[in-house]
Amino acid sequence: MSLRKIATIGHPILRRPARQVTRDELLSPTFQRLIDDLIETMRDANGAGLAAPQIYEPVSLCAIEVDNNPRYPYKPPIPLTVLVNPEIIPITDETFDNYEGCLSVPNLRGLVPRYTQVRVQALDRQGNPLDFHVRGLSAGTYQHEVDHLLGKVFLDRVRDTTSLTTWADFERFHQRAFIERAKALVERFGS
């Protein structure tokens, strides 16, 4: 395993849709090392998730994990989840405003509307099919990571650019109110 450099906004890799991965490619030792590198890089950067294009690999792969994350203390736990060729399907029209940040967009946060409930279909790292529902605040995390595989960053989904803030000003002016809304969402959906 090795740490990878994280691409930042402006690099063309973040704007290209990722290509689908074949089963043979997925099961190859090279791709399995890529998965390990992705996870190690995500954990080292205290990310709640990381997509392969963010480490300069244009393939449909992302990892998600929330476990006492210092960047997101209000997020409920998500066990390590590797998604290959994922698809997100909204199962409701209801949305919530999620204050998002991104390792590829350093020192910036903004409000992004996210569906409160989604269905996730993908392969796991062994090529087994995954099909599950995610609700509440966690649903926003999955949507954020899969967006990277579509060539999108959270800034593309910000409806009101006056919500953009640095991390320091988020903590100073917006975090308390957002955490209260996030806690209510977690209580409602359990995640």
Image (spheres, rainbow, N blue to C red):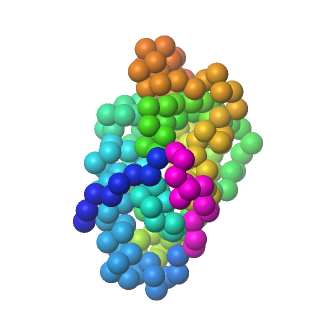
| Residue extending furthest toward the bottom | 24
- Asked whether 157 or 185 is in front, the reply is 157
At x 40%, y 34%, the residue is 72
Is residue 4 highlighted in magenta? no
Q: Does residue 21 appear anywhere in the picture?
A: yes
Percent position (x, y) of residue 1? 25, 65
49 relative to 94 in the view: left or right: left
Q: Give the range drawn in magenta.
A: 9-20
Is residue 18 highlighted in magenta? yes
Location of residue 29 by image quarter: bottom left
- Check the image and report above or below for 30 versus 17: below
- Asked whether 108 or 35 is in front, the reply is 108
Q: Does residue 184 appear anywhere in the picture?
A: no
At x 65%, y 42%, the residue is 156
32 relative to 189 in the view: left or right: left
Percent position (x, y) of residue 51? 47, 57
- Check the image and report above or below for 128 versus 130: below
Percent position (x, y) of residue 190? 49, 38
Percent position (x, y) of residue 109? 51, 31
